[in-house]
Image (spheres, rainbow, N blue to C red):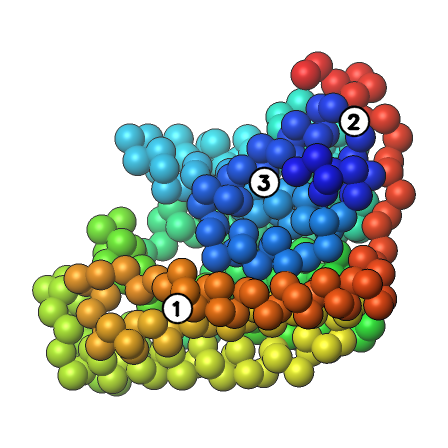
Amino acid sequence: MRKELTAAGITDPWLARSYSICRRLNAEHGKTYYLATLLLPPAKRPFVHALYGFARYADEIVDAFGDQSVDQRRSALAHLRRRLYEALDRGRAAEPVLAAVTDTALRWNITQDTFEAFLHSMEMDLTVTHYQTFEDLYEYVYGSAAVIGLQMLPILEPSEREACAVGARNLGIAFQLANFIRDIDEDLQRGRIYLPLQELAEHSVTRETLMTRVVDDNLRAALAAQIERVRQLSQDAQPTIPLLHPSVQDTIEAARILYCGIADRVEEIDYQIFEQRAKVPTGRRLQVAGPRWLAAERARRRFGPGLIPPARRPYATGVAH
């Protein structure tokens, strides 16, 4: 971590600690995502850790505080929003995760509207339990997944911003949909169904049949249709990856293969999502990550690590740690 922080120009002790906490959250809770992050140039990794750390921080408010009422969690999210916007306005924060994500947002000019869209989707999780159509679901996945890609885009240095923004949105949504397919059982336990009910009904799958947790041919067909959407979004995003800085292209391609590979794994286990978690095997992760790591190293030697914005003014000034 020290090597990453030094390369990124993060020398303030408080900020260094803040970024380290985000890195730990990424390593503990986003193993596939974390593995892909390690393929990035060291100087870019802390900023991606910060974005993940904030997303995880907000998600914990929604899902981990199960003993709290909806109103309490809504109030906690509102408080988080106020603290974030105050931090973005002041340029500093006294909480580690907010400190890191604020520094990242200001260094890379990540717009506040992306954070607003994300927090809106987190609020939806408090009361919305299902979505009738994909158009209905899109409002949620735009904020919960597409904007994560848009937030990362400045760090990845696109040569064609608009084209890459479309690719980032598509890839973020593909990752989210793959998770939805894998996590149907877990989401049912929380009272939620993320796959569009109208599309499930086309294969005679209803909320009631999902609740039986029986995998039959109807459910297999319904999940196969959703997996096809993941693959299409992934394929649509792939041509934009070469438009990113050469030092990060292999990272994003590895993430695309591994995350969308969750959908492949669902097929491989014959859609038995209620009996086992569809995880990309470690061997497959290494098979993908190994060659991509070597390619990324070659790209960094040839093209350099890419842009790192200059450090902002000393962060600790005026902050009660």
> Which corner quadrant of the image does residue 167 belong to?
bottom right
- Kind of residue sitting beneath label 1: Ile
Q: Return the x and y of residue 127 as percentages of the image width and height.
A: 36, 49
Q: Compared to 213, does 101 lie above or below?
A: above
Q: CA distance from mark 1 to mark 2?
A: 39 Å
Could one spot residue 136 in this view of the protein? no
The local secondary structure at tag 1 comes to helix
Count neighbours of disc 2 (C-alpha within 10 A) and say few if under 14, some if 14 to 19, many if 20 or more.
Answer: some
Q: Compared to 85, does 296 lie above or below?
A: below
Q: Is residue 195 left or right of residue 167?
A: left
Residue at image x 54%, y 52%? 34
- Nearer the observer, 48 or 148: 48
Q: Compared to 74, does 276 lie above or below?
A: below
Label annotation for residue 45: none
Closer to the chain start, of discs 2 and 3, is: 2
The local secondary structure at tag 3 comes to helix
Q: Compared to 240, does 23 lie above or below?
A: above
Which residue in the structure is indicated by mark 3? 23
- Nearer the observer, 240 or 177: 240
Which residue in the structure is indicated by mark 1? 262
Q: Return the x and y of residue 320 as percentages of the image width and height.
A: 70, 14
Count neighbours of disc 3 (C-alpha within 10 A) and say few if under 14, some if 14 to 19, many if 20 or more.
Answer: many
Q: Is residue 318 left or right of residue 149?
A: right
Closer to the chain start, of discs 3 and 1, is: 3
